[in-house]
Image: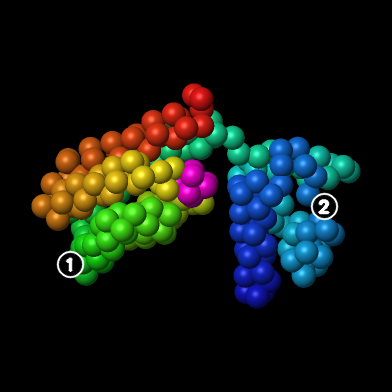
Amino acid sequence: MDDNQSLGQRVFHRIREDILSGKYGKDEELKEKTIGDELGVSRTPVREALRQLELEGLVTIIPNKGAYVVGFSAQDIHDIYEIRSLLEGLCARWAAKRATPEQLEALEEIMMLSDFKVQRGHFDQLVELDNKFHQQLYEASGSKVLEHVLRNYHHYVERARKMTLPVPKRSVESNEEHRQILAAIRDKDEDQAEVLANRHMMNTIQNFDRLYLRK
């Protein structure tokens, strides 16, 4: 049973990533047999994955017809960032209260490496470090529930981060915002940590809107 669940989750994550990356376009039919053959699995885990994707709003299943991509628009990403800004603020507040010395050290190391990449102009490599900073921040919140919710959102905004972070100006700004958030957490300033984390997300929204919603 565990093996089947693991397989089902792998298929689910693969199809979701293919939808978010644009491999499957809006209204495109997702054929169970074709996907199963491509992934080397039977129809059953594909069918289960499509049902799960329907719950997430990425797929619509029409009885006796098939499963079709609903897709994910730039406006959807904007909305998720705005919701996430509130959750990230709460995460930073709790991290300022609960972060362990080891977690603070891990955040410091990520910042040092990010600074190095910025100085060398390796902006394309900042995406993964940005991911690591936020993932470590989720852990530092000390809340498994909040961490789970934020990790789920992460899958949907990762595409936007890949598009915006390689822009040099935004990379430098984002790195500095991380530094300020970390300083507030280190100082155990819960109010400031929450404000800065919320502002960080809102700045990302504004940058994304300039690039993709208001051309």
Colouring of the image:
rainbow
160 falls in the magenta region: yes
Above or below residue 191? Residue 152 is below
Residue 152 in percent (x, y) is at 49, 51
For the residue pair 189 and 27, the one nearer the viewer reads as 27
For the residue pair 196 and 110, the one nearer the viewer reads as 110
Q: Which residues are magenta?
A: 156-163
Q: CA distance from mark 2 to mark 1?
A: 50 Å
Residue 209 in percent (x, y) is at 45, 30
Question: Tag 1: Cα neighbours inside 10 Å, few (<14), some, or many (≥20)?
Answer: few
SS state under label 1:
helix
Q: Earlier in the sequence, mark 2 or mark 1?
A: 2
Query: What residue did someone put label 1 on?
Result: 101
For the residue pair 92 and 77, the one nearer the viewer reads as 77
Say whether residue 106 is visible: yes
191 falls in the magenta region: no
Location of residue 205 by image quarter? top left
Say whether residue 103 is visible: no
Residue name at image x 78 percent, y 49 percent: 30
Query: What residue did someone put label 2 on?
Result: 31
Q: Is residue 171 left or right of residue 107?
A: right
Location of residue 141 by image quarter? bottom left
Q: Residue furthest left?
A: 187
Residue name at image x 73 percent, y 63 percent: 45
Above or below residue 81? Residue 161 is below
Question: Tag 2: Cα neighbours inside 10 Å, few (<14), some, or many (≥20)?
Answer: some
Say what amino acid the circle numbered 1 marks: Pro
Q: Which quarter of the figure is the N terminus placed in?
A: bottom right
Main SS of the magenta segment?
Answer: helix
